[in-house]
């Protein structure tokens, strides 16, 4: 009897345990189902401005709204301009009952702007993305082609990268002599502002100015001649006339020739007309350089003008000091005291304006390694550092009441000549590397892919994507194709999705047993320079996804 009761009790215990187990399993499945529903994550519902939109005026803010609440912390929302700098300086604010974020904007000018967002949904899932909107009708960003004087006059010859031959040597030599004559003459004109009490100094200054003016005339004639020969390479002489009269470069050449013709007359005219001449000559040179291709032009050309002004003051004063030193050593010592102060000011102005101009020309200092322009600029900076060392020793002797050593003065003039050489070369080089259209193709057993981007420069581009899938994979036509672009230089940025549309491709590039499908898009989906990753995601009719990636740099 006792055994029967124990067996019944044991059976009841097992049944209870089974019911508890079933209940636990049911609860776990319910929790998993709820988690599965929550795992849908937040989805972007609305963006203001809209992705890929074009606006006439600057928006007051950028707003991103999702379909569910976001986590209170970790939200990031930036707006990058075409220089990839964040223009949204306001604080990111929550909105729409915690489902969205907003950041205020200052008044923005015409351009392509990239919105990058990163949030955490209420279930803890990170979500990020990026898109582009456009204000107004932005002009193309400066690239190597816009800085090429050959293309500015309507030709397509090589510019500054064809190696050293006789023609390029003569052109570089003429440019070096032109810069030397310009800086020496303009600098000596600036020193006309000083009231020299010594007749020896006045006489030396007048004679030096006369010689510099004659040298500037000859050098400018050579510079314009060899420049026109370079720009009109392979064209009849009548093309020279068109360049001089119909192009900005040509009109600047005419202005420089007229100013050079007046240079030998400078000792015979008053101080004010001399200063007008110097201002005109330096301004014409400032306008004819790379600075004229960048915006805002008043800022870039203004920086270039101040840079040349400081170089002229230092170079002209140094040449005058050396001439006085050969004429009368005590007078050279007295002039050196005045010159050293202004040389220091000029040198500081040169460094400041040089750095600001470089930062305006280049997206980053890393670009110095990509071009000959950058390498010559580094050489110029190194020579300038040696100039600073020589100036330190000259100034130390002056403070002791001693005359500067002739060897130091000659070394300083030699460094000035070296700087003139580097300037003559680097100003003919292009600060930005040349962009080339991207043509990427990858073969595979299960898929072939081609991606073409033209012209592959920052701003508006044409995108073409070709997909070949095996005919036995459904009908060989993809279910979905995505082209996504990621700026790799910007940490935390999301992919920019390029909207693709089908089109009929007429190129003869078929592969046996494969079906080709072609897509294209046009728009500013490469809004700024940098290292980019292009990702092509293809889902076939059997829901198999394949991903192909390539990286490339645009300048």
Image: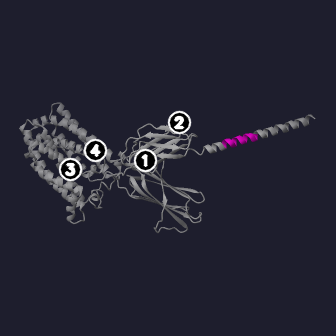
Q: Is residue 358 left or right of residue 445?
A: left
Q: CA distance from mark 4 to mark 1?
A: 25 Å
Q: Which residue is mark 2?
A: 72
Crowd band around label 1 with a 10 angstrom C-alpha radius: few (<14), some (14–19), many (20+): many
Q: Which disc is residue 114 wearing? A: 1
Q: What are the residue bounds of the magenta stretch?
A: 21-32
Q: Quadrant of residue 161?
A: bottom left
Judge whether 306 appears above or below 224 on screen: above
Q: Secondary structure at mark 4?
A: helix
Q: Which residue is mark 3?
A: 284
Residues tagged 4 and 3 counted as in contact (Cβ below 8 A): no
Q: Is residue 28 left or right of residue 216?
A: right
Crowd band around label 2 with a 10 angstrom C-alpha radius: few (<14), some (14–19), many (20+): few
Q: Secondary structure at mark 1?
A: strand
Q: Which disc is residue 299 wearing? A: 4
Q: How is the image coloured?
A: one colour
Which residue corresponds to the image point at 12% horizontal and 42% vertical from the top-left?
272
* Dot 4 or dot 3, earlier in sequence: 3
**Measured from the top left, where is residue 49 in percent x and y?**
45, 46
* Dot 2 or dot 3, earlier in sequence: 2
Q: CA distance from mark 1 to mark 2?
A: 24 Å
Q: Is residue 319 visible?
A: no
């Amino acid at each position: 009897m006792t055994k029967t009761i124990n067996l019944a009790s044991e059976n009841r215990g097992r049944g209870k345990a089974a019911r508890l187990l079933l209940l636990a399993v049911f609860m776990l499945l319910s929790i998993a189902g709820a988690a599965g529903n929550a795992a849908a994550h937040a989805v972007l519902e609305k963006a203001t401005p809209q992705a890929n939109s074009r606006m006439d005026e600057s928006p007051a803010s950028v707003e991103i709204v999702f379909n569910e609440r976001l986590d209170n912390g970790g939200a990031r929302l930036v707006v990058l301009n075409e220089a990839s700098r964040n223009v949204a300086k306001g604080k990111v604010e929550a909105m729409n009952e915690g489902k969205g974020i907003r950041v205020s904007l200052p008044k923005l000018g015409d351009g392509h702007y990239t919105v990058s967002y990163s949030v955490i949904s209420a279930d803890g899932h990170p979500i990020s993305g990026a898109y582009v909107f456009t204000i107004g009708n932005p002009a193309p960003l400066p690239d190597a082609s816009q800085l090429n004087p050959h293309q500015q006059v309507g030709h397509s010859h090589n510019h500054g990268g064809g190696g050293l031959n006789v023609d390029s040597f003569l052109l570089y030599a003429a440019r070096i002599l032109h810069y030397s004559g310009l800086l020496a003459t303009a600098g000596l004109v600036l020193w006309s502002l000083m009231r020299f009490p010594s007749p020896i100094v006045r006489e030396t200054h007048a004679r030096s100015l006369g010689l510099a003016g004659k040298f500037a005339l000859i050098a400018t004639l050579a510079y314009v001649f060899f420049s026109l020969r370079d720009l009109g390479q392979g064209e009849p002489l009548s093309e020279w006339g068109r360049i001089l009269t119909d192009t900005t470069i040509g009109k600047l050449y005419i202005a420089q020739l007229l100013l050079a013709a007046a240079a030998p007359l400078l000792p015979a005219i008053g101080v004010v007309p001399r200063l007008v001449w110097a201002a005109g000559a330096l301004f014409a040179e400032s306008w004819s350089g790379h600075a004229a291709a960048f915006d805002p032009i008043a800022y870039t050309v203004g920086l270039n003008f101040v840079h040349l002004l400081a170089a002229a003051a230092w170079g002209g004063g140094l040449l005058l000091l050396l001439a006085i030193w050969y004429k009368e050593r005590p007078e050279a010592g007295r002039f050196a005291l005045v010159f050293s102060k202004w040389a220091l000011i000029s040198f500081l102005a040169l460094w400041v304006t040089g750095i600001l101009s470089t930062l305006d020309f280049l997206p980053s200092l890393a670009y110095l390694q990509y071009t000959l322009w950058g390498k010559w600029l580094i050489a110029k900076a190194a020579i300038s550092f040696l100039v600073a060392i020589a100036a330190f020793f000259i100034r130390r002797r002056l403070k002791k009441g001693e005359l500067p050593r002739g060897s130091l003065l000659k070394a300083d003039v030699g460094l000035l000549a070296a700087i003139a050489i580097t300037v003559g070369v680097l100003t003919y080089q292009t600060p930005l590397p040349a962009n080339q259209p991207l043509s990427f193709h990858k073969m595979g057993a299960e898929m072939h892919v081609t991606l073409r981007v033209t012209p592959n420069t920052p701003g508006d581009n044409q995108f073409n994507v070709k997909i070949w899938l095996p005919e036995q994979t459904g009908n060989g036509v993809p279910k979905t194709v995505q082209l996504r672009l990621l700026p790799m230089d910007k940490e935390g940025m999301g992919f920019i999705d390029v909207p693709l549309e089908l089109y009929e491709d007429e190129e003869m590039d078929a592969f046996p047993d494969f079906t080709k499908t072609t897509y294209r898009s046009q728009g500013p989906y490469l809004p700024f320079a940098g290292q980019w990753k292009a990702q092509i995601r293809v889902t076939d009719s059997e829901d198999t996804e394949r991903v192909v990636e390539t990286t490339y740099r645009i300048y």
